[in-house]
Every structure is written in structure tokens, then in C-alpha cells.
Image (cartoon, rainbow, N blue to C red):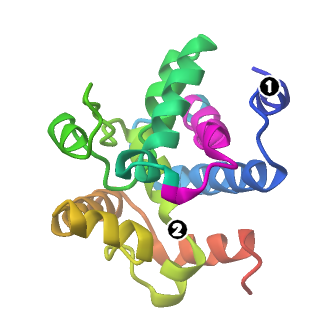
Amino acid sequence: MEFKELYKKYNVTNLKIKHMQDVAKLCIFINKMLDLEVNEELLTQSALLHDIGSAYYRGIPINDLNDFDKMWGHQVKTLEWLKREGLVSVAETASRHNCFGINNEESKEWGYKKGINLLPKSNESKILAFADSIRAKYIEENDFITIIHKDARELLKKHKMVVIAEERKKKLFQFLKKHGLDINKTIKYAKELENLE
């Protein structure tokens, strides 16, 4: 698979490409310490493409988007675009990269009439979801459970999902720790990737 061609075709920014590459490196790092059955090629490809759908929303003012698109739209676009490219398994994994996900009923309540399940379910999507959630603010506060991002928290609060989201994050974190995740090593490596040291 030629990622450069897909990035060019979907007009993905260099900043977004760098982020996806960093997440892929973190996924591989995390996977090496876990005792889980994982398809590393699928994990890597999914990480390298997980935010490709965000290009669809570039240039659209955030206030012009409905709640669903503000929070989940780029994941749906990632799913659609990668399936269109014939990358069905990658699409299914990459589109589930949010660490707390959303199910059919919840997505309908948010205004997505078709309903969609974006809960991380495979080992690959769980690793990707956790790796994508490790950002500077979480590292600084050493908190991988709380929904720290202000906009996300406001939308989740509006839809009465803060507790649900934090419980799902906690379960994901506990699942990975149970299978060998060394959080201190992970934080150190994530800091190196983000040049925080």
C-alpha cells in the first residue's frame, strides 16, 4: 500500500501525516510490550491512516458542523474513504480510533440517523485508540481516564455521556495494563515523539 498516494489524493496536511506517523510508532512500541494476539501490519496501516478523514472537514468552520460531525465525522469519513479504496479491514480498525467510541443508539441520539458503531473492539483498534489518546496534556497531568479536552467534554456533557466515556477509557486502559502495558515507558516514548523532554 502506498500511503503517500493516499495522503495526496485526500489532501492530507503534513502536520496530520506527522501525527499519524507518530501514533503508528507509538502503536508498535505499545504492541511490543503486550501479550496480545495482534496483526502488526494491520495495526500499523490503520494507525498511518486513522485521521485521513479529517481532511474532509478542513476549512469548514466548527460552528457550521452538527455535534456528530464535530466529534465523530472524521472517523466516518475515514471508514468511507478507506472502504472505497478497498481497505476494508484497515477501515474498520482505523475508524475506531477514539478511546471511548460511540455505539448505534448513541450516534442516533447525536443526530447521525443511520447509526454507527465506532467502539474499539479488536486488539488492534484498542491499541490504536489508546495510542491516539496519549497527547501532551494527558501526559502532563498523568491522567488517561478523564476527558480533558474542553470541546469534547462539553459535547459529551451535552449528550450525557461524560461518565460513559470516562468509564470506557478506564476499561481500555485497564485492559492494556492487564496485558503488559508499562505506562511509564509509554509516557517516556510518547514524550520523545512529541519532543517534550
Q: Give the extent of the magenta segment.
A: 42-63
Q: Helix, strand, or loop for circle 1?
A: helix
Tell which tag, 2 or 1, sits nearer the viewer. Answer: 1
Answer with the quarter of the image where residue 37 lies: top left
The residues bearing labels 2 and 1 have C-alpha atoms spaced at a distance of 28 Å
Q: Are marks 2 and 1 in contact (CB under 8 Å)?
A: no
Would you name the residue on which mark 1 appears?
Answer: 9
Answer with the quarter of the image where residue 106 lies: top left
Badge 1 amino acid: Lys
Where's residue 45, x and y in %?
Answer: 64, 33
Query: Who's the residue at 23% across and 69% down the image?
Result: 157
Would you name the residue on which mark 2 appears?
Answer: 134
Badge 2 amino acid: Ile
Where's residue 8, x and y in %?
Answer: 84, 31
As displayed, is residue 17 above or below residue 42? Answer: below
Query: Who's the residue at 35% across and 58% down the image?
Result: 176
Q: Quadrant of the N terminus?
A: top right
